[in-house]
Image: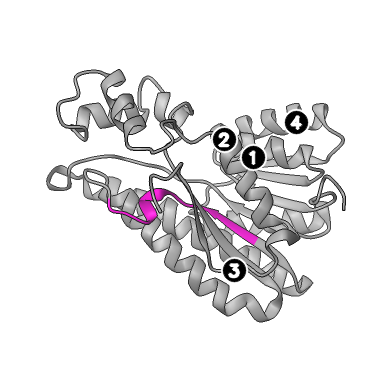
Amino acid sequence: MTDRPLEGQRVVITGGAQGLGEALTERLAREGCDIVIGDINGDGAEAVATRIASETDRKILATCVDVTNEAAVKLLFDMAAKKLGGVDIAISNAAILIAEPVVDADAEKWRAVMNVNLFGNFLVTREACRVMKKQGSGSIIQINSKSGKKGSARNSAYAASKFAGIGLIQSVAIEMAEFGIRCNAICPGNLLDGPLWTDPAKGLFVQYLEAGKVPGAKTIDDVREHYVNQVPMKRGCTYKDVENAVIFLASQQSSYMTGQAINVTGGQQM
């Protein structure tokens, strides 16, 4: 068996211009995949593609895509089918989070979270199925969250979108099994060292502190300590933890698995 089980696989990944998406793109390239990155940050996606292509022997392409735009998502998969010759793996990673107490929640911000995290996931999944059905094979992986398994105070839009995402995955898995397409989700724990959390202007440490999500917290360090202490393994989730789960679900090692939402949480969610 090759030590790169995904050698030659063709991948589409959304939200690949930064953070976890960038890390996943780099890992998949090093595993031997050719990749098309779709991200609303087109310049960022191009920069990531250029860097990773220069560091590996793989074809890495990028395009600007708003996952809530039906035509744009279709073009993303058409591009991958044309430039790569098909799509073996689709990773639906693009997402946003806006944390607010429910009684103060802005309806349009709530709608925006659902639009990206659920409707965007639907569009990516639908277009992946369209291409993969013609091939008779494929693996769709949705990056979900532990918040798709358990409610999250002052974070109702995000949790609702992630719960719904698991329903989408399970439904599509049933429907597409006869066509050789597997559909699974990964539910990471808190990526405490990633930009989603650490961005000084809009990161979750700042958002959660300002929203009062952690009772008694006075500083960002208080918020971090609170979340670390919730994990039996006493550390946050890392990109590598998620990467390893993606490689497993994309490979033939998980060929009898579909409709699953795999926790990668250090025991925080079981």
Q: Earlier in the sequence, mark 2 or mark 3?
A: 2
Q: With respect to residue 126, does 160 lie above or below?
A: above
Along the horizontal axis of the image, is 186 left or right of 74?
left
Give the mark nearest the N terminus, 3 or 1: 1
Task: Determine the secondary structure under disc 1.
Answer: helix
Residue pointed to by mark 4: 52
Which mark is first along the chain, 3 or 4? 4
Among the 4 quarters of the image, the one containing residue 221: top left
Residue type, numbered disc 1: Leu
Marks 4 & 3, CB-CB < 8 Å contact: no
Residues tagged 2 and 4 counted as in contact (Cβ below 8 A): no
Residue drawn 70% across and 66% down?
A: 255
Q: Nearer the viewer, residue 18 or 226?
A: 226
Q: How crowded is mark 1: few (under 14 residues within 10 Å), some or many (20 or more)?
A: many
Q: Give the numbered dot on residue 24.
A: 1
Report the Cα–Cα distance between label 1 and label 4: 11 Å
Disc 3 target residue: 258
* Residue 115 counted in the magenta span: no
Range of the magenta residues? Answer: 140-151
Viewer-proximal residue among 29 and 236: 236
Q: In this view, does 195 lie above or below 170?
A: above
| Callout 1 touching callout 2 (CB < 8 Å) | yes
Secondary structure state at the residue bearing disc 4? helix
Distance (Cα) linking label 4 and label 3? 30 Å
Could you give the CA–CA distance between mark 3 and mark 1, rounded to whole angstroms?
A: 21 Å
Q: Position of residue 151 (x, y in %)?
A: 28, 53
- Left or right: where does residue 265 sit relative to residue 97? right
Q: How many circles with numbers are drawn on the protein?
A: 4
Q: Going by the image, does 48 lie left or right of 108?
A: right
Q: Are marks 2 and 3 in contact (CB under 8 Å)?
A: no
